[in-house]
Image (cartoon, grey):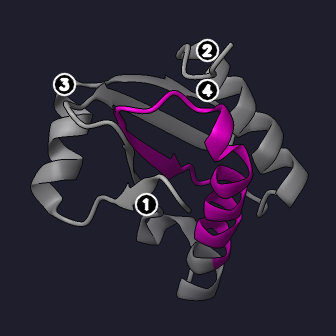
Amino acid sequence: MKHTVSLKKNYEFGRVYRRGKFHAGKFLVLYVLKNKLDYNRLGITASRKFGKSTKRNRIRRLIKENYRQMEEMIKPGYDLVIVARKTGELPSYLEVKKEMKFLLKKLNMMVE
């Protein structure tokens, strides 16, 4: 990811949760908060409720790869937190891609 840095600290995630806007889909919840930087910061979470570590890591990799593919179409200067929601099945790559695109458009994060 060329123009994106990872959110790592708990207080960074907390700030986005408290002050940011969010929208939920079937598999993901996207939180967005404007930052004062000229690049995006991304955090990805999947709680233990989601499943064992292999399942959580798999969904994180799917989200990260989809973000990497869409990175050029996302407006810069935001903190984004993507939360994997607990569902019965593990979503496919295309389902994650479709939902991320939908959520980014809903929150007006796509460059026109």
Side (left or right) of 19 relative to 50: left
Closer to the chain start, of discs 3 and 1, is 3
Closer to the chain start, of discs 2 and 3, is 3
Closer to the chain start, of discs 3 and 4, is 3
Q: Nearer the viewer, mark 3 or mark 4?
A: 4
The reply to whether discs 1 and 4 touch (Cβ–Cβ < 8 Å) is no
Q: What distance separates the C-alpha of mark 1 from that of mark 2?
A: 20 Å
The amino acid pointed to by label 3 is Arg
Q: Is residue 78 magenta?
A: yes
Q: In the image, residue 80 lies at what x, y percent?
A: 40, 41
Tell me the SS state at disc 2.
helix
Label of residue 106 in the image: 2
Residue linked to disc 1: 45
Q: Quadrant of residue 60?
A: bottom right
Residue linked to disc 3: 19
Q: What distance separates the C-alpha of mark 2 from that of mark 3?
A: 18 Å
- First to last magenta residue range: 58-87
The reply to whether discs 2 and 3 touch (Cβ–Cβ < 8 Å) is no
From what the image shows, is residue 18 above or below residue 94?
above
The amino acid pointed to by label 1 is Thr
Residue linked to disc 4: 104
Q: In the image, residue 50 lies at what x, y percent?
A: 55, 65
Residue found at x 61% / y 26%: 104
